[in-house]
Image (cartoon, rainbow, N blue to C red):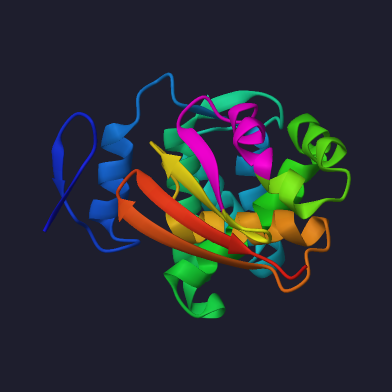
Amino acid sequence: MHVVDNRVWWPEAPSGSDEDLAQRLAMASPSDTARGMFLRATLDAVRTLGDEEAVLSCQRASGEEKLVDFFIYPVSANLRMVFAAARMLEARCGGFDEALRQLGYKAAESFLASAAGMALQILARGDVKRLVGHLPSAYRASVSFGVRSVVWTGPTSGRLTMRREFMPHAFHEGLLLGVLGKVHARGARVRGHQLSTLESDYDLSWEA
């Protein structure tokens, strides 16, 4: 079985493997960037769930010496840091994917405290469906890459599609759960599907 991006065919790699990371890094260009808040959120999560030596090791993996929330950094730095952090935390969290979910959940806190996250909350006005509908624009304000859209599947459910998204689906499952939790969405559920290395879908639902 093979998966494809818009440039080259890639053999499917196991989640969390060196090959998985290498494929994602190879597909990134210098113009693919993310705000420093996401890298700092990863370090905060490692600090909470790990220790200071692990924090230093993750920062070294990113290749960045100084991190500022609103500065932009190559997505490759973010990828290296997230993979390094998830590998350090997987034994404690119960697996690599669960570690990614915990890191994503922590990233939601930093995202919601940012200008883009605050704008999202103002636009949502506490309404879950309104918040989900504005997620694509909030992502655009935080990263330079990817295309995201929402299709409604019911009054309290929808599917968020992500194309040319570098983070694994488990990371975004955690991030989306963290965002939904901020507006106190009752019974919030997020199920991600990794379609190819840079393509994923997310089924979101909550109770009315």
Q: In which quarter of the image is the C terminus?
A: bottom right
Q: Nearer the viewer, residue 170 or 19?
A: 170
**Which residue is pictured at 44% across the width and 69% down the height?**
96
Q: Is residue 173 left or right of residue 155?
A: left
Is residue 114 depicted above or below 174 in this figure? Answer: above
Which span is picked out in magenta? 133-152
The quarter of the picture where residue 10 lies is: top left
The quadrant in which residue 101 appears is bottom right
- Is residue 93 visible to us here? yes
Q: Residue at x 83, y 56 (%)?
A: 183
Give above or below for 137 relative to 41. above
Observer-nearest of 153 and 105: 153
Asked where in the image residue 156 lies, by quadrant, the reply is bottom right
Question: How many dots with numbers?
Answer: 0
Residue at the spot 70% in from the left edge and 59% down from the top edge: 178
| Residue 26 on the magenta span | no
Q: Can residue 66 be seen in this view?
A: no
Q: Where is residue 1 in the image (x, y as percent from the top left)?
A: 11, 59
Q: Which of 129 and 41 is in front in this view?
A: 129
Establish if 30 lies above or below 13. Answer: above
Q: In this view, does 104 lie to the left or right of 168?
A: right
Looking at the picture, how far across and down is residue 174, in whole percent? 60, 61
Question: For residue 135: magenta?
Answer: yes
Q: Which residue lies furthest to the top in this view?
A: 31
The image position of residue 128, as x and y in percent, is 77, 53
Image side of residue 197 versus residue 188, left or right: left
Q: Position of residue 42 (x, y in %)?
A: 61, 51
* Residue drawn at (29%, 60%) of the image: 17
